[in-house]
Image (cartoon, grey):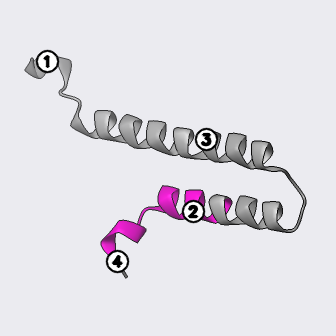
């Protein structure tokens, strides 16, 4: 498996993107709803990655 697809967050974001896109094609939502949903999903994904990076690279205060 490609290493870039091992992230559960990425797989979940892609799955939600695909489901939202299918909903547009079958007429369950409009473009505005799809656009808002995708913005939130990938915004939360990006924030989660930044939070994970900061948490993993934080230096303990006694070492500063």
**Figure quadrant of residue 37:** top right
x, y percent for residue 57? 22, 36
Q: Looking at the image, which residue sits at the far right?
A: 28
Cα gap from disc 4 to disc 3, whole angstroms: 25 Å
Q: Which residue is mark 2?
A: 14
Q: Which one is closest to the eye, mark 4 or mark 3?
A: 3
User: Which of the labelled discs sits on residue 45, or is there none?
Assistant: none
Q: Which residue is mark 1?
A: 62
* Spatial separation of the CA atoms under disc 1 and disc 4: 39 Å
Residue identified by numbered label 3: 39
Relative to 30, residue 46 above or below: above
Mark 3 and mark 1 residues within 8 Å of each other at the beta carbon: no
Point out residue 51 in the picture as x, y percentages from the top left corner. Answer: 40, 35
Q: Where does the magenta region start and end?
A: 2-16
> Residue tagged by mark 4?
2
Q: Quadrant of residue 22?
A: bottom right
Kind of element beneath mark 4: loop
Q: Residue 1's image quarter?
A: bottom left
Whether pointer 4 and pointer 2 mark residues with C-beta atoms closer than 8 Å, the reply is no
Q: Residues within 10 Å of mark 4 (few under 14, many from 20)?
A: few
Determine crowd level at label 3: few under 14, some 14-19, many 20+ residues with C-alpha closer than 10 A.
few
Q: Measured along the vertical axis of the image, is residue 13 above or below residue 35?
A: below
Instruction: Give the mark toward the camera: 3 or 1.
Output: 3
Examine the rendered structure and indicate whether residue 24 appears above or below residue 32. below
């Amino acid at each position: 498996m490609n290493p870039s697809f091992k992230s559960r967050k990425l797989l979940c974001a892609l799955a939600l993107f695909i489901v939202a896109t299918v909903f547009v094609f079958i007429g369950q939502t409009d473009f505005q709803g799809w656009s808002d949903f995708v913005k939130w999903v990938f915004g939360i994904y990006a924030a989660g990655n930044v939070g994970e990076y900061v948490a993993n690279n934080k230096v303990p205060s006694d070492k500063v």
